[in-house]
Image (spheres, rainbow, N blue to C red):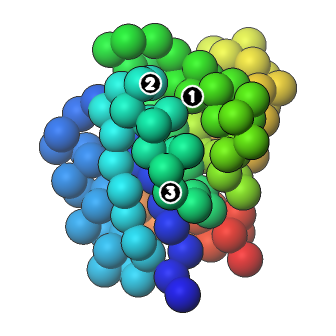
């Protein structure tokens, strides 16, 4: 069975590009654009990996991690994506449970390499 990835990203363009890329790579892909939607989808689906944008319209991506962990539905791994290079933000993400933090724009090869590393 293909690994399941939840893309949490408020940009429709980015979500569509990630979805196409990951489906072509053989993954089952779900998406959400808000903290509320991501939390709902994370509870409804069995998610292996979450690609998590940190800036969402209704809060921080870190709120998604917290909510899923508290409900017992945390994914196997979370890969945070941000446009910021702040070392304190990176550490906050790692402390919240992210396995890795990547700076946008994320190079496709690096993204796929990280996903493979985290899933297998």
According to the image, label 1 marks what residue?
A: 64
According to the image, label 2 marks what residue?
A: 35
According to the image, label 3 marks what residue?
A: 45
Q: Is residue 117 above or below residue 37?
A: below
Q: Is residue 50 above or below residue 65?
A: below
**Quadrant position of the C terminus in the picture:** bottom right
Query: In the depicted view, which residue is nearer to us: 1 or 110?
Result: 1
- Give the residue at x 69% y 25%: 66
Spot occupied by residue 89 in the image (x, y as percentages of width and height): 67, 16
Spot occupied by residue 65 in the image (x, y as percentages of width and height): 65, 31
User: Circle 3: is it few (<14), some (14-19), or many (20+) Cα within 10 Å?
Assistant: some
Q: Is residue 76 visible?
A: yes
- Give the residue at x 32% y 14%: 57
In whole angstroms, how far apart are the C-alphas of marks 1 and 3? 14 Å
- Sequence order check, earlier mark of 1 and 2: 2
- Furthest toward the right, the residue is 95
Describe the element under mark 1 as helix, strand or loop: helix
User: Circle 1: is it few (<14), some (14-19), or many (20+) Cα within 10 Å?
Assistant: many
């Amino acid at each position: 069975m293909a690994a399941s990835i939840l893309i949490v990203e408020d940009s429709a363009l980015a979500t569509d590009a990630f979805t196409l890329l990951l489906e072509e790579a053989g993954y089952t892909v779900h998406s959400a654009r808000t903290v509320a939607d991501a939390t709902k989808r994370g509870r409804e689906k069995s998610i292996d990996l979450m690609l998590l944008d940190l800036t969402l319209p209704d809060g921080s991506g870190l709120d998604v991690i917290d909510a899923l962990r508290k409900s017992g539905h945390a994914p196997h791994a979370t890969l945070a994506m941000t446009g910021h290079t702040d070392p304190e933000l990176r550490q906050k993400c790692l402390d919240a449970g992210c396995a890795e933090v990547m700076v946008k724009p994320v190079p496709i090869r690096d993204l796929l390499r990280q996903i493979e590393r985290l899933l297998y």
